[in-house]
Image: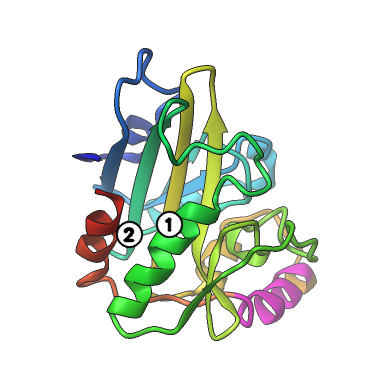
Amino acid sequence: MHIERVRGRAAEVVEPTLPDPLPRAVARVVRLERAALILGSRQRLDEVEPGAPERAGVDVVKRFSGGGAVLLAPDRFLWIDVLLPRADDRWVDDIAVSFHWLGDVWAAALREVGLRADVHRGPLETTAWGSLVCFGAMGPGEVTVGGRKVVGFSQRRTRVGARFQCLVHDAWQPADLLALLRLTADERAAAAAELGTRAAGAPLADLESAVLRRLD
């Protein structure tokens, strides 16, 4: 798999579609130069607390894959996009299981760095905050450690292939994210209590190389 590295502000690295043609699989490691609140494709900008991102120095952008919001601070996450042509042997037509192979890659990499990781092979969970916050619910192929979500996935498909977006935080701090969303004080407190138990971070120092070796 070809490896690329990109760096910039969120609006510069969240791409609208896949290259066409897409002759080979690509693993693209993404770095941010400024903190960003990244919304899923079906989320609305009015779900963001007015003025809060500006006060916090956070960009707000929408990605072109589904799922809930994520908050990313520079050097506090590992984000790898996997661009997979339909002709690749790893391609699966069934969206319900299309992430499973990628979950296996990440789980093996996490085990290499000392974490006991498992792949969620069930359906998308329905939780109180899962549609609002990406790490608030478990989806097919996503990876857990100790029952908490550590690797989040989203997917965008076109006629040439798919972009699988993969994300791990170094620490899970939902309060920072919730402060940027348009919620009442009671909703924010309830969400923080629930989300604090649903996800976790992971040490990132050796994880990138462990993942990339398994994607090759």
Q: How is the image coloured?
A: rainbow
Disc 2 secondary structure class: strand
Decide whether residue 195 is among the magenta residues. Answer: yes
Please state which of residues 183 and 171 is positioned toward the viewer in this rendering. Answer: 171
Residue linked to disc 1: 167
Please state which of residues 120 and 166 is positioned toward the viewer in this rendering. Answer: 120
For image coordinates 24% across by 48% down, the residue present is: 216
Report which quarter residue 28 is drawn in. top left
Relative to 111, is 73 above or below? Answer: above
Relative image position of residue 49 (x, y in whole percent): 63, 51
Amino acid at the residue labelled 2: Leu
Q: Earlier in the sequence, mark 1 or mark 2?
A: 2
Relative image position of residue 206 (x, y in whole percent): 20, 71
* Mark-to-mark CA distance, 1 and 2: 6 Å
Residue linked to disc 2: 78
Please state which of residues 128 and 143 is positioned toward the viewer in this rendering. Answer: 143
